[in-house]
Image (cartoon, helix red, strand yellow):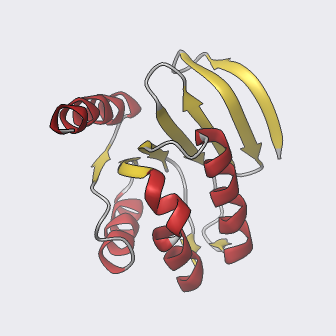
Amino acid sequence: MAQQLALDYKTNVIMSHTIIFPNAKFWVDDEEEVLYCKFKNCKSYRKLEVPRVMEYIDVILEVTNKTPMPFIIDLRNTKGRFEHKAAKLFATHPDLHKIKQFEAFVINNIGMKLLILTYKRLYDPYTPFKIFSSQTAALEYCLKTQIKLYAIN
């Protein structure tokens, strides 16, 4: 796991606090207050397990400073599956639940779409979400939804 201060030249997002794992990257867009989660796994036999989910949750809580915000979860070109306990933990962890306002998933294949829909139906039917094919569309959704959320409060 590595930490860095950087500018992502692909998205032009200023990342004040980035944490990188071999197969994942987490950062917060300082201007938009959005958590980005980028997963990269090309091996379909790999399974997301509880110890790794605990590490991811700790990192998410750290980079967000436990501040509620939307999550953009980029799963493009990702394969694999998750343990039942790992999925349940990620969906129901009390500290994560407090900061996860809504989720925007970015995908590029039908297999990942089916996995997300199954995960949301079984483990996390309460957190609002949408699925997109581009990160730009996902960010637009997050910004529009945040404006509506703040207008209500």
Residue nearest the viewer, comparing 58 with 133: 58
Q: Residue at x 60, y 16 (%)?
A: 9
Q: The C terminus is located in which quarter?
A: top left
What is the x, y in percent for residue 48? 64, 71
Furthest residue in direction right, as rendered: 2
Q: Where is residue 100? Give x, y as percent.
A: 43, 52
Residue 137 appears left or right of 60: left
- The percent coordinates of residue 33 (x first, y second) are 46, 30
Q: Quadrant of residue 152?
A: top left
Instruction: Name the outermost residue toward the bottom.
Output: 84
Please state if 145 lies on the left or on the right of 102 as rendered: left
Left or right, 92 with respect to 127, comes to right
Total numbered badges shown on the rendered structure: 0
Please give the name of the residue rendered at 68% of the width and 45% of the height, measured from the top-left corner.
62
Residue 18, compared with residue 52, is above or below; it is above
Query: Of all residues shown, which one is farthest toward the front?
Result: 153
Compared to residue 74, the image places residue 4 above or below, namely: above
Percent x, y of residue 53:
65, 66
Residue 132 in which image quadrant: top left
Which residue is at the front of the view, 149 or 14? 149
Q: Residue at x 30, y 32 (%)?
A: 137
Taking depth in this image into account, of 115 and 50 the one nearest to the observer is 50
6 or 147: nearer the eye?
147
Seen at 46% across and 51% down, the residue is: 99
Q: Is residue 68 above or below residue 121?
A: above
